[in-house]
Image (cartoon, grey):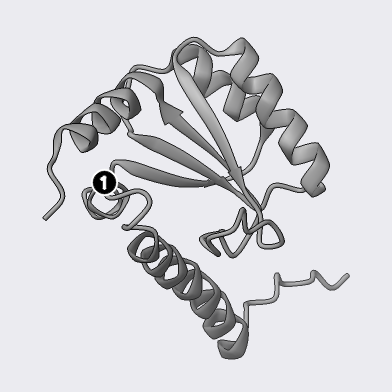
Protein backbone atom coordinates (compact mmCIF):
# COMPACT_ATOMS: atom_id res chain seq x y z
CA UNK A 1 0.00 0.00 0.00
CA UNK A 2 1.38 3.38 -1.02
CA UNK A 3 1.26 6.31 1.33
CA UNK A 4 0.84 9.74 -0.08
CA UNK A 5 3.25 12.41 0.92
CA UNK A 6 1.99 15.85 1.63
CA UNK A 7 2.77 18.06 -1.34
CA UNK A 8 5.24 20.82 -0.60
CA UNK A 9 4.33 24.24 -1.96
CA UNK A 10 6.14 25.06 -5.15
CA UNK A 11 8.31 28.14 -5.35
CA UNK A 12 5.67 30.14 -7.25
CA UNK A 13 3.10 29.50 -4.51
CA UNK A 14 5.57 30.61 -1.84
CA UNK A 15 6.37 33.73 -3.83
CA UNK A 16 2.67 34.48 -4.30
CA UNK A 17 2.03 34.16 -0.55
CA UNK A 18 5.00 36.43 0.16
CA UNK A 19 3.80 39.01 -2.35
CA UNK A 20 0.30 39.05 -0.89
CA UNK A 21 1.56 39.70 2.62
CA UNK A 22 4.13 42.21 1.32
CA UNK A 23 1.33 44.00 -0.55
CA UNK A 24 -0.82 44.13 2.58
CA UNK A 25 2.03 45.50 4.70
CA UNK A 26 2.97 48.06 2.04
CA UNK A 27 -0.72 48.84 1.55
CA UNK A 28 -1.32 49.57 5.23
CA UNK A 29 1.81 51.70 5.52
CA UNK A 30 0.75 53.74 2.49
CA UNK A 31 -2.80 53.97 3.79
CA UNK A 32 -1.75 55.38 7.17
CA UNK A 33 0.61 57.83 5.45
CA UNK A 34 -2.26 58.96 3.22
CA UNK A 35 -4.63 59.83 6.07
CA UNK A 36 -2.25 61.99 8.12
CA UNK A 37 -4.23 65.11 7.21
CA UNK A 38 -7.45 63.68 8.72
CA UNK A 39 -5.94 61.44 11.42
CA UNK A 40 -2.49 62.88 12.27
CA UNK A 41 -1.60 60.38 15.00
CA UNK A 42 -2.41 57.18 13.11
CA UNK A 43 0.79 56.84 11.04
CA UNK A 44 3.04 57.30 14.08
CA UNK A 45 0.93 54.82 16.04
CA UNK A 46 1.16 52.35 13.15
CA UNK A 47 4.95 52.70 12.99
CA UNK A 48 5.20 52.13 16.76
CA UNK A 49 3.07 48.97 16.60
CA UNK A 50 0.15 50.58 18.44
CA UNK A 51 -2.27 49.70 15.63
CA UNK A 52 -2.82 46.00 15.18
CA UNK A 53 -4.08 44.66 11.84
CA UNK A 54 -6.08 41.44 12.09
CA UNK A 55 -8.40 39.38 9.93
CA UNK A 56 -12.03 39.94 10.83
CA UNK A 57 -13.82 37.63 13.24
CA UNK A 58 -16.87 39.06 15.03
CA UNK A 59 -16.29 36.91 18.12
CA UNK A 60 -12.75 38.27 18.37
CA UNK A 61 -14.00 41.85 18.01
CA UNK A 62 -16.46 41.32 20.86
CA UNK A 63 -13.85 39.59 23.01
CA UNK A 64 -11.31 42.40 22.49
CA UNK A 65 -13.97 44.92 23.48
CA UNK A 66 -14.74 42.93 26.64
CA UNK A 67 -11.08 42.67 27.73
CA UNK A 68 -9.93 46.04 26.33
CA UNK A 69 -7.16 47.63 28.39
CA UNK A 70 -5.80 50.18 25.93
CA UNK A 71 -2.85 48.04 24.85
CA UNK A 72 -3.39 49.35 21.31
CA UNK A 73 -4.57 52.67 20.01
CA UNK A 74 -6.66 50.66 17.56
CA UNK A 75 -7.25 47.29 15.99
CA UNK A 76 -8.06 47.28 12.29
CA UNK A 77 -10.21 44.25 11.47
CA UNK A 78 -9.61 43.71 7.76
CA UNK A 79 -11.50 41.78 5.09
CA UNK A 80 -14.89 42.28 6.72
CA UNK A 81 -17.38 40.25 4.65
CA UNK A 82 -20.38 42.60 5.01
CA UNK A 83 -22.11 44.77 2.46
CA UNK A 84 -21.67 48.48 2.95
CA UNK A 85 -25.15 48.80 4.51
CA UNK A 86 -24.57 45.87 6.87
CA UNK A 87 -21.15 47.21 7.82
CA UNK A 88 -22.70 50.53 8.80
CA UNK A 89 -25.34 48.76 10.94
CA UNK A 90 -22.81 46.49 12.67
CA UNK A 91 -20.62 49.46 13.58
CA UNK A 92 -23.64 51.38 14.92
CA UNK A 93 -24.58 48.37 17.08
CA UNK A 94 -21.02 48.00 18.38
CA UNK A 95 -20.90 51.70 19.29
CA UNK A 96 -24.25 51.47 21.09
CA UNK A 97 -22.97 48.61 23.27
CA UNK A 98 -19.33 49.50 23.98
CA UNK A 99 -18.07 51.61 26.87
CA UNK A 100 -14.33 51.18 26.21
CA UNK A 101 -14.05 51.37 22.44
CA UNK A 102 -15.36 53.42 19.58
CA UNK A 103 -15.90 51.85 16.18
CA UNK A 104 -15.55 53.15 12.66
CA UNK A 105 -15.73 51.45 9.30
CA UNK A 106 -14.12 51.97 5.97
CA UNK A 107 -14.92 50.37 2.66
CA UNK A 108 -13.30 50.78 -0.76
CA UNK A 109 -16.67 51.88 -2.20
CA UNK A 110 -17.44 54.48 0.49
CA UNK A 111 -15.51 57.73 0.16
CA UNK A 112 -17.39 60.08 2.52
CA UNK A 113 -16.10 62.90 0.34
CA UNK A 114 -12.34 62.81 0.97
CA UNK A 115 -11.26 59.60 -0.78
CA UNK A 116 -9.51 58.32 2.34
CA UNK A 117 -11.13 54.89 2.29
CA UNK A 118 -9.23 51.69 2.96
CA UNK A 119 -8.39 49.28 0.15
CA UNK A 120 -10.30 46.42 1.85
CA UNK A 121 -13.45 46.59 4.00
CA UNK A 122 -12.55 47.13 7.66
CA UNK A 123 -13.93 47.77 11.10
CA UNK A 124 -11.67 50.00 13.18
CA UNK A 125 -11.84 49.39 16.92
CA UNK A 126 -10.29 52.34 18.78
CA UNK A 127 -9.61 53.06 22.39
CA UNK A 128 -12.23 55.64 23.36
CA UNK A 129 -10.10 57.42 26.00
CA UNK A 130 -6.99 57.59 23.82
CA UNK A 131 -9.00 58.96 20.90
CA UNK A 132 -10.63 61.61 23.09
CA UNK A 133 -7.19 62.64 24.39
CA UNK A 134 -5.74 62.85 20.90
CA UNK A 135 -8.66 64.96 19.70
CA UNK A 136 -8.26 67.37 22.64
CA UNK A 137 -4.54 67.70 21.88
CA UNK A 138 -5.29 68.44 18.24
CA UNK A 139 -7.82 71.12 19.18
CA UNK A 140 -5.23 72.70 21.47
CA UNK A 141 -2.59 73.00 18.72
CA UNK A 142 -2.40 76.21 16.79
CA UNK A 143 -2.33 75.95 13.03
CA UNK A 144 0.72 77.56 11.36
Against 133, residue 10 (above or below) is below
Q: Nearer the viewer, residue 101 or 72?
A: 101
Q: Nearer the viewer, residue 12 or 110?
A: 110
Q: Quadrant of the N terminus?
A: bottom right
Q: Is residue 122 left or right of residue 41?
A: right
The answer to which quarter of the image holds residue 8 is bottom right
Q: Pointer 1: residues within 10 angstroms few (<14), some, or many (20+)?
A: some
Q: Is residue 13 left or right of residue 71?
A: right
Q: Quadrant of the C terminus?
A: bottom left
The answer to which quarter of the image holds residue 20 is bottom right
What residue is rendered at 84% in x and 73% in y?
2
What residue is rendered at 73% in x and 37% in y?
88
- x and y, in percent, of residue 54 in the image: 52, 46
What residue is rendered at 81% in x and 42% in y?
85
Q: Is residue 130 left or right of residue 57?
A: left
Q: In this view of the protein, can residue 88 be seen by the observer?
A: yes
What residue is rendered at 66% in x and 62% in y?
108
Against 134, residue 49 (above or below) is below
Total marks shown come to 1
- x and y, in percent, of residue 90 in the image: 73, 30
Q: Mark 1 = which residue?
A: 41
Q: Is residue 28 left or right of residue 81?
A: left
- x and y, in percent, of residue 91 in the image: 66, 30
Against 89, residue 16 (above or below) is below
Q: In this view of the protein, can residue 82 be seen by the observer?
A: no
- x and y, in percent, of residue 105 in the image: 60, 42
Name the outermost residue toward the bottom: 12
Q: Nearer the viewer, residue 123 or 5?
A: 123
Secondary structure state at the residue bearing disc 1: loop
Name the outermost residue toward the right: 1
Amino acid sequence: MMTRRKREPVEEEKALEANVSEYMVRGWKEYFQSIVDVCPWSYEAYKKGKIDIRDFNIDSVLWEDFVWEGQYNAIVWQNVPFTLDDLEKVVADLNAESTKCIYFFSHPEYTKGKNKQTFVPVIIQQDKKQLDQARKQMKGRKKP
